[in-house]
């Protein structure tokens, strides 16, 4: 199927890379439903954003994902990972910036991770309103144990694409991310 109408007379859905017919994925179903309600609606953005969101959800919800086996959500692992990769303690505000999260979300996750003995908080001697967060030995060990398996899991998930396709997708997503960060003013600041 090329760029013209399909055999069913339905207009082509955007993006059929690598000869894959995307008409049966879950986003294609939603797009067809919207087209039935609003035939003139440009669903191009929905097709891209919907698929990005759906792929992310599938990767995070998979029962066999190492993070799930370790009892961690992706957002909890991102907090632990930020502390591990920076190599020093961070304030909750710095963690929010490092993980692209709201302050309230970071506070909730830190409470859960503290209860599990994976992070510890200490007050600032000069400003009692400021807390400093660091990994415990158990938190560091958990990150170091889970990360290789998680990366292998993600590599296996991406292996359904040819290496060139993975590189092309990574490049397109990097460009989209960079431009969106500039457009929304959400570029990462203060990161080292």
Image (cartoon, rainbow, N blue to C red):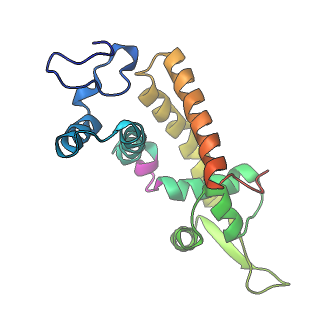
Query: In this orientation, which residue lies closer to the viewer: 40 or 161?
Result: 40
Residue 140 drawn at (x, y percent): 65, 54
Residue 174 drawn at (x, y percent): 61, 35
The residue sitting at the front extreme is 40
Identify the residue at horizontal 51%, vertical 57% (top origin): 75
Query: In this orientation, which residue lies closer to the viewer: 72 or 184?
Result: 184
Residue 151 drawn at (x, y percent): 54, 35
Horizontal side, residue 33 vs residue 95: left or right: left
The residue sitting at the bottom extreme is 128
Is residue 21 depicted above or below 129 in this figure? above
Rendered image quadrant of residue 114:
bottom right
Report the label total. Answer: 0
Identify the residue at horizontal 21%, vertical 37% (top origin): 32
Q: Which residues are magenta?
A: 67-73
Is residue 10 depicted above or below 153 in this figure? above
The residue sitting at the left extreme is 8
Identify the residue at horizontal 54%, vertical 45% (top origin): 146
Horizontal side, residue 19 vs residue 84: left or right: left
Residue 177 drawn at (x, y percent): 59, 41
Instruction: Mark yes or no: residue 136 visible.
Output: no
Rendered image quadrant of residue 156:
top left
Horizontal side, residue 24 vs residue 126: left or right: left
Instruction: Mark yes or no: residue 25 visible.
Output: yes
Identify the residue at horizontal 57%, vertical 52% (top origin): 142
Is residue 144 depicted above or below 137 in this figure? above
Rendered image quadrant of residue 41:
top left
Residue 96 shown in magenta: no
Query: In this orientation, which residue lies closer to the viewer: 138 or 41?
Result: 41
Query: In this orientation, which residue lies closer to the viewer: 13 or 22?
Result: 13
Residue 69 shown in magenta: yes
Of the 4 image quadrants, the one containing the N terminus is top left
């Amino acid at each position: 199927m090329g760029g013209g109408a399909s055999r069913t007379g339905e207009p082509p859905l955007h993006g059929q890379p690598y000869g894959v017919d995307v008409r049966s994925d879950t986003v294609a179903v939603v797009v067809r439903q919207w087209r039935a309600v609003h035939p003139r609606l440009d669903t191009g953005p929905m097709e891209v954003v919907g698929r990005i969101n759906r792929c992310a959800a599938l990767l995070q919800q998979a029962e066999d994902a190492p993070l799930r086996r370790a009892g961690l959500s992706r957002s909890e692992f991102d907090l632990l990972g930020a502390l591990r990769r920076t190599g020093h303690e961070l304030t909750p505000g710095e963690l929010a910036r490092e993980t692209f999260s709201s302050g309230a979300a970071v506070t909730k996750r830190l409470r859960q991770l503290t209860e599990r003995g994976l992070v510890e908080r200490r007050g600032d001697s000069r400003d009692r309103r400021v807390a400093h967060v660091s990994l415990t030995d158990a938190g560091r060990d958990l990150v170091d144990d889970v990360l290789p398996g998680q990366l292998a899991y993600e590599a296996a998930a991406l292996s359904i694409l040819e290496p060139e396709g993975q590189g092309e997708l990574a490049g397109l997503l990097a460009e989209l991310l960079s431009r969106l960060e500039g457009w929304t003013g959400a570029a990462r600041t203060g990161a080292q």
